[in-house]
Image: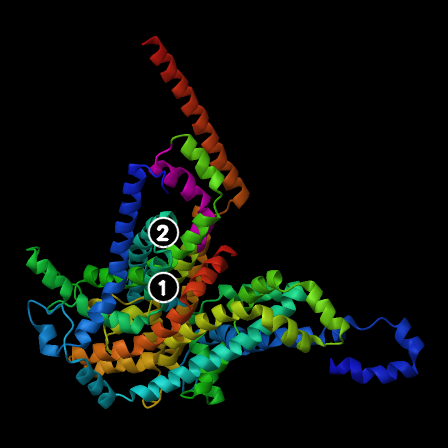
Amino acid sequence: MAVTSKTAPAAITRPSAAAEKPPNKYRQAFPQYAAVSPFFILFAIFGAFPVLFSIWISFHSWDGIGQMKWVGLEQYRYLLTDETFWKTIGNTMIIWVLSTVPMLLLALVIANALHNATRLRTFYRIAYFIPNVTSVVAITLVFGSIFSNNFGLLNAFLRSIGVGEVQWLTSPWGIKIAIATIVTWRWVGYNAIIYLAGLQAISADVYEAAKVDGASPRQTFWRITVPMMRPVILFTAVTSTIGGLQIFTESRVLFGDTSNIGGPGDAGLTIVSYLYQSAFIKNQFGYGAAIGWALFILIVLFSIINWRLIGGNDDERLTRRAARRVERRIAAQNAKREAADVHANVD
Amino acid sequence: MSMQTSTERIRTAVGHIVLMFGVLVSLFPFYWMVVMASNTTPDIFSYPPKLLIGSHLFENMGKVLDNIDFFGSMLLTLIASLGVTVLVLFFDSLAAFAFAKYEFPGRNLLFGLLLATFMIPAQLSLVPQFVTLAEFGWIGSLKALIIPGAANAFGIFWMRQYAKGAIPDELISAAKVDGAGFFRQYLTVGLPVLRPGLAFLGIFTFINVWNDYLWPLIVMTDPNRLTLQVALDQLNGIYGTDYSMVMAGALMSVVPLIGVFLIGARSFIADLAAGAMKF
């Protein structure tokens, strides 16, 4: 670096001093500190400071322009009694369950099929991944027309097979199903690709043992594949939870009306939609900040629940457990086969 | 393969049928977008619905250009996406290079701090971020879209994992012997080796910025300077009844990005999956 070359002549004039005094390790690491500093500087300004500032804002009543008025914990007290807020939590939870459960199950099925397919692998992967890189706004517009009550493709189909129409975009459940469908459609492929990587990381020996043992594909899937995929499933569960709690664009674009961004009866109003509505449409900045903190607490809570339910065990223990299960089954199978042989001999 | 039993062959066939059905579901909305963008609005409203591609695509695209400044929005979005991508690639790879390959006091503490920032959801600080940018006078300007996202924890984490395995220590030692300083080591040793990793992070960042909706919706308040996503939403809000035009706009906004994605899709998908396995 420039620093060392400039200090070199000075070192020559006082060689003994330079040799005795150990170089300052912090000053020596200056280039490294400089290299990592852009992130930390940007984070301080646009990440850490706003987080602290949002606590301050949430203790105030403020329209963003005028005087901030200190209200203490009033925003939080109101939040706990605000029916709309609880409704948005309910909406978000329902949409999250309606999207995450089918999404992860379908992803697992697709990943398994992809793992076994030897042809068209690249084609499949790209075709499944394209929904994820497509803009949510554009695709929500398409789904909005498919789900449209009067002229939507889905209702036209339902009418033609004699089922009758469903009021997708005006009924509370219809709205949630429509939003959950968009989310599922966008993320199944993404999760399938990640599960596929998980599948490929499982050693072939385990499958070989199961095959020798005569396990059916279904048994192999549920008794070996799923347990060994636990860390990967945990990753997708945590990311889908965080993503699910932050759903916004789908419902915002589906009901393009700024005065009623949650759709009829606020049935599609999510937590983030409510935050957006409170802060940026109604100019209640203090309340918006308080909703942000409620969201943060929910995300932390749900991540912990996920961790407890799915994870919490280290990979090694899981691998050993799966291996032990295979061994047990082989032993049982052998015993049965021996018994069958005995029978055959008797016959 | 030749030893395949008939049950295995059936299983393979069933697998392909399942996968093909999934592909149809994945791609159908795109087909439907084209169908709606190429028919007239009365056609779309008719029953039974038109299921085939029509002949009004260019007419509908023309209407989009008449009603919103489509290319202006596209240029703005392109500049923002490229701006963020270039800065992210530089800052993230530089930081990742330092974290992965050098010992310095406080390194682990700083990296731990960086990982901790993953926990904070973006929406938590939406309100104060807006206030901060308003204080800077950045609302409505490109700076609001580019600067806050110019370096991110995900990219540094991802590139560090990549750099650890990809850059041989011997090359750095050799560069040091040659008298190269840290930045020169980064340029001559780090960057060339990191190139495949940069390709992934670049596409990933570009797509995310291009598709982002909430942040530009809040900070780009000037109706003449909207990103493509917000402009498209506005087109729907104002001319929502002209379905075929809105769909033409949606199609026009989606095609360039899918093009960018398809160029690097193969290695991009592999890198993304590999990255997820490292968490």
Relative to residue A5, is residue A304 drawn left or right? left
Query: Which of the image's four quarters has the N terminus of chain B?
Result: top left
Q: Nearer the viewer, residue B58 or A286?
A: B58
Q: Is residue A96 placed above or below A347 in the rendered structure?
A: below
Relative to residue B3, is residue B271 drawn left or right? right
| The residue stretch that appears in magenta | A215-235
Disc sitting over residue A244 in the figure: none
**Crowdedness near tag 2: few (<14), some (14–19) or many (≥20) residues, C-alpha within 10 Å:** many
Disc sitting over residue A80 in the figure: 1
Residue pointed to by mark 2: A114
Query: Mark 1 or mark 2: which is in front?
Result: 2
Give the main secondary structure, helix, strand or loop, of the magenta stretch: helix
What amino acid is at disc 1? Leu
What amino acid is at disc 2? Leu
Where's residue B26, x and y in %?
28, 61
**Crowdedness near tag 1: few (<14), some (14–19) or many (≥20) residues, C-alpha within 10 Å:** few
Q: Nearer the viewer, residue A247 or A235?
A: A235
Taking the spot 40% from the left edge, 66% from the top edge, the residue there is B265
Task: List the single residue furthest toward the front.
Answer: B2
Counting every numbered tag in the picture gives 2
Relative to residue B39, is residue B172 drawn left or right? right
